[in-house]
Image (cartoon, rainbow, N blue to C red):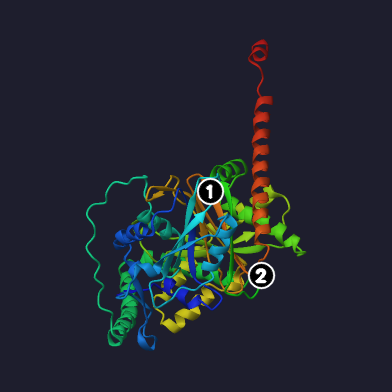
């Protein structure tokens, strides 16, 4: 029985009637959809590589410990891999509405926490060129954005006709479901391990006092930074209202080359450019709604992966959170990017992300009731206006059953009192902004998507102008050889 980490368990504690803690993606493939049985066989043949997908939650009685992952003896893949179709004409807008309905439904906690929807009937860009889609969702308690990218390689191939992976795996035999007494015993073990873990840490500190003192000092400083940030709540906006369970989905496509050209010409990182683009779009959207933007700076919760190379492909969450600035008060796109770049550089030099990691480590020693309270403090929704998560994806084409993956659209989740989440992912030279909005609070999510396009375009134009001035200046500053020889 695998025990959930403190961070994983916190996503369970945060889930409410209107806040579904699942994340996912929409994958669009070219070509005709595969037969349903063939796709089910494809998934089933590779589930041994991701055993968590056959496991469900088990809760020790009397809250004796964090939940556990146990094999589901009634696992039925046909419950998780579902089939549907769009009515004619099979438009992208119909796909968006379907995705919104799918992401409006909570996952059943009595079963493994994932679903995969095969969507037929999607029209292609050209007549006679069919497409199909795969809509996936999994609970954040079992997967984060970075491990999700790694897991995609389990179901997707690098070639249209992949090399055989060897013999078929042995038939899966679930381990017996634990009894209430066994779950209670596991909970007691967890309670016993906490003081032992603290004792082990103390012994380690005795054997290496200098290093332990330095780490303790850094941890205290990091916690102090998190505490100071917690005293400064995010401003109130139309994005921070009571939400319902229903969702809207939209997305915006761009090119990774544009983002790299912008950061090369104007400075910063691709992630800085992403935050500046979101800030520019939100500025327009707030002004459209008649909201004042003067002196207004929104806060984005920016997840930061702390997953090491040795942890690639493992499930569960290895993330810390920073609160990045969105200077919507700034009208000039170049200045807006400069403000984001400076603030993010300061955050990276600070210990805010380390502080979140320290809190997560301390939560490993907390009983479940305190863990739920700690997760609410660490993930307090009053400290940020929206989630903006940027995950780098593979920069080469991927395939499923010989069909090329053409679009990869990430979908995040909405915490309480947050009407918008923006997930960004790059894939094969493209960048997609996936927007998830509350159905009632964001009826104009399409307008916000259009403002993202405009915000990208103004930064791209500014970068082009900056490169032009540099090139022109270099030409004007170079004297002809004949003149130099004459001089």
Residue 136 coordinates in the image, percent (x, y)? 45, 62
Report the residue marked by disc 1: 124
**In the picture provided, is 378 more to the left or to the right than 469?**
left
Which image quarter holds the N terminus?
bottom left
Local secondary structure at mark 1 = loop
Return the residue nearer the eye: 84 or 268: 84
Q: Which mark is residue 183?
A: none
Which image quarter holds the C terminus?
top right
Q: Which mark is residue 441?
A: 2
- Compare marks 2 and 1 and give the one earlier in the sequence: 1
Q: Residues within 10 Å of mark 1 (few under 14, many from 20)?
A: some
Local secondary structure at mark 2 = loop
Q: Is disc 2 in contact with disc 1, using a CB cutoff of under 8 Å? A: no
Residue depicted at 44% across the width and 49% down the height = 394
Return the residue nearer the eye: 6 or 423: 423
Residue depicted at 60% across the width and 50% down the height = 273
* Inter-mark Cα distance, 2 to 1: 31 Å
On the question of residue 25 being in view, the answer is: yes
Residue 91 coordinates in the image, percent (x, y)? 58, 55
**In the picture provided, is 474 more to the left or to the right than 412?**
right
On the question of residue 392 being in view, the answer is: no
**In the picture provided, is 236 more to the left or to the right than 15?**
right
- Which-is-in-front pick, marks 2 and 1? 1
Return the residue nearer the eye: 477 or 160: 160
């Amino acid at each position: 029985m695998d025990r959930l980490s403190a961070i994983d368990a916190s996503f369970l504690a945060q889930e409410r009637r209107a806040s579904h803690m699942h994340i996912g993606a929409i994958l669009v493939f070219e070509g005709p959809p595969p037969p349903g049985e063939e796709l089910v066989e494809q998934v089933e043949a590779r589930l041994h590589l991701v055993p968590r997908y056959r496991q469900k939650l088990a809760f020790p009685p009397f809250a004796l410990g964090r939940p556990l992952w146990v094999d589901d003896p009634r696992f039925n893949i046909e419950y998780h891999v579902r089939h549907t179709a769009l009515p004619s004409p099979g438009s992208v807008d119909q796909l968006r509405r379907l995705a919104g309905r799918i992401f409006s439904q909570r996952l059943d906690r009595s079963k493994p926490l994932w679903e995969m929807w095969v969507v037929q009937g999607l029209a292609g860009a050209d007549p006679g060129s069919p497409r199909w889609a795969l809509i996936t969702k999994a609970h954040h308690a079992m997967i984060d954005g970075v491990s999700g990218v790694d897991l995609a390689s389990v179901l997707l191939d690098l070639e249209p006709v992949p090399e055989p992976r060897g013999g078929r795996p042995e038939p899966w035999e679930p381990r017996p479901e634990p009894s209430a007494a066994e779950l209670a015993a596991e909970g007691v073990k967890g309670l016993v391990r906490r003081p032992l873990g603290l004792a082990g840490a103390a012994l380690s500190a005795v054997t290496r006092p200098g290093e332990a003192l330095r780490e303790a000092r850094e941890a205290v400083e990091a916690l102090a930074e998190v505490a100071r940030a917690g005293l400064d709540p995010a401003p109130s906006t139309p994005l921070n209202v009571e939400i319902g369970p229903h969702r809207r989905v939209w997305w915006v496509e761009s090119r990774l080359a544009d983002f790299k050209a912008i950061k090369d010409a104007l400075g910063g990182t691709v992630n800085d450019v992403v935050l500046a683009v979101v800030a520019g779009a939100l500025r327009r959207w707030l002004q459209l709604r008649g909201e004042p933007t003067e002196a207004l700076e929104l806060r984005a919760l920016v997840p930061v992966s702390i997953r090491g190379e040795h942890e690639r492909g493992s499930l569960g969450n290895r993330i810390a959170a920073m609160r990045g600035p969105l200077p919507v008060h700034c009208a000039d796109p170049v200045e807006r990017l400069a403000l984001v770049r400076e603030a993010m550089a300061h955050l990276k030099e600070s210990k805010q992300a380390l502080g979140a990691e320290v809190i997560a480590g301390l939560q490993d020693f907390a009983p479940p009731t305190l863990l739920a309270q700690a997760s609410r403090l660490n993930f307090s929704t009053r400290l940020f206006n929206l989630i903006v998560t940027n995950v780098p994806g593979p920069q080469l084409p991927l395939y499923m059953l010989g069909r090329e993956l053409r679009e990869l659209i990430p979908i995040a989740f909405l915490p309480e009192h947050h009407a918008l989440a923006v997930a960004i992912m790059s894939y094969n030279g493209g960048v997609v902004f996936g927007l998830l909005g509350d159905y009632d609070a964001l009826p104009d999510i399409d307008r916000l998507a259009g403002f993202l396009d405009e915000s990208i375009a103004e930064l791209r134009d500014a970068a082009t102008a900056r490169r032009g001035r540099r090139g022109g200046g270099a030409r004007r500053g170079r004297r002809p050889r004949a003149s130099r020889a004459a001089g």
